Amino acid sequence: MASQGIDRDKLRAAIRRMGSEYVFYMLDDAITLLPQTKLRKLIAQYLNPAELRPHGERKGNLLADVKAFQKASLTGKYYQPFSVNSKNYTEKSSGTLAWIADCCRLLERCVAHSKKEDPATVCQAFEIIFSLLSKIDEGTDDILFFADEGGSWEVGVDWENVLPAWFKVLSATAGPSEYAQRITTVLKRHYKHGRIKMFAVARKIATPAQRQALPERESASSS
């Protein structure tokens, strides 16, 4: 059986071929995945660990963290413009990269919490993030800066992982018509090309009454 290990030289070469955007995301994921001892060793060469110590014990509260993210987003904390030219028009500012990383991390937490937490709380957290994605597409708030035309599609949400978890908590908290309407709206706005498949998933998760309220396959596939 072939080794499941990673060749470090191949990894270094692959990382050097990656754009800085993906190196940023990889490092951001590493912060989550590494145990404290290895994380400290990694950053000690570049930052002062003493300046990064937590202020007391921090208990993760999903909804509070999502609301803090919403507030930071709507007050422009992530909005970081730069002078655009023919060489950098495809780049993202560090503020935009940070927003994408934070958004995806919070959605992953929502998915994890959907299996064990109060459905109403998790549903609210999901929908706060969905509303921010919609605002980015509307372009009415200075949430993110895109050098070229951009939108929520650039966030790269893993909808096939996120949506079933949201359907589960939504089914537990919404009536039939509300269940159908909210799913239809989110799919139309953010995952139109995959909505036939997701409507099928939503039907499996729904209660009998919610299932009846969902549009038929033909309606779901219409533009």
Image (cartoon, helix red, strand yellow):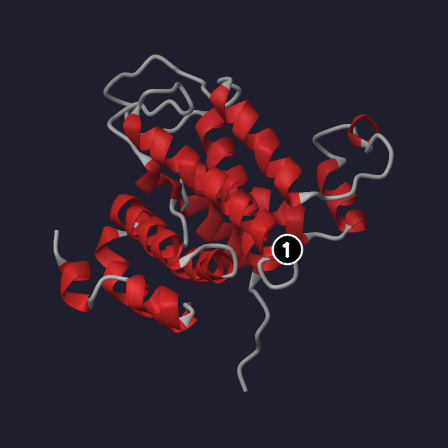
Q: Tell me: 88 left or right of 79.
A: left
Labels in figure, total:
1
Q: Quadrant of the N terminus?
A: bottom right
215, above or below 46, in the image: below
Rendering coords of residue 155 (x, y %): 39, 41
In the current view of this chain or complex, which residue is farthest to the bottom? 1
Dot 1: few (<14), some (14–19), or many (≥20) neighbours within 10 Å?
A: few
The reply to whether residue 14 is in sight is yes
Q: Which of the 4 image quarters holds residue 197?
A: bottom left
Rendering coords of residue 107 (x, y %): 52, 48
Residue at left 49%, top 60%? 165
Residue at left 36%, top 29%? 135
Which one is nearer the viewer's eye here, 57 or 181? 181
Q: Tell me: 142 left or right of 126.
A: left
Which one is nearer the viewer's eye here, 215 or 103? 215
Q: Could you tell me the amino acid type at mark 1?
A: Asp
Residue at left 81%, top 33%? 54
Q: Which of the 4 image quarters holds residue 137?
A: top left
Rendering coords of residue 33 (x, y %): 66, 53
Q: Tell me: 193 left or right of 35.
A: left
Residue at left 57%, top 65%? 6
154, above or below 112, in the image: above
Q: Tell me: 223 left or right of 72.
A: left
Which one is nearer the viewer's eye here, 130 or 172? 172
83, above or below 159, in the image: above
Q: Which of the 4 image quarters holds residue 18?
A: top left
Rendering coords of residue 88 (x, y %): 31, 23
In the current view of this chain or complex, which residue is farthest to the right? 56
The reply to whether residue 202 is in sight is no
In the current view of this chain or complex, which residue is farthest to the top? 83
Residue identifier under label 1: 118
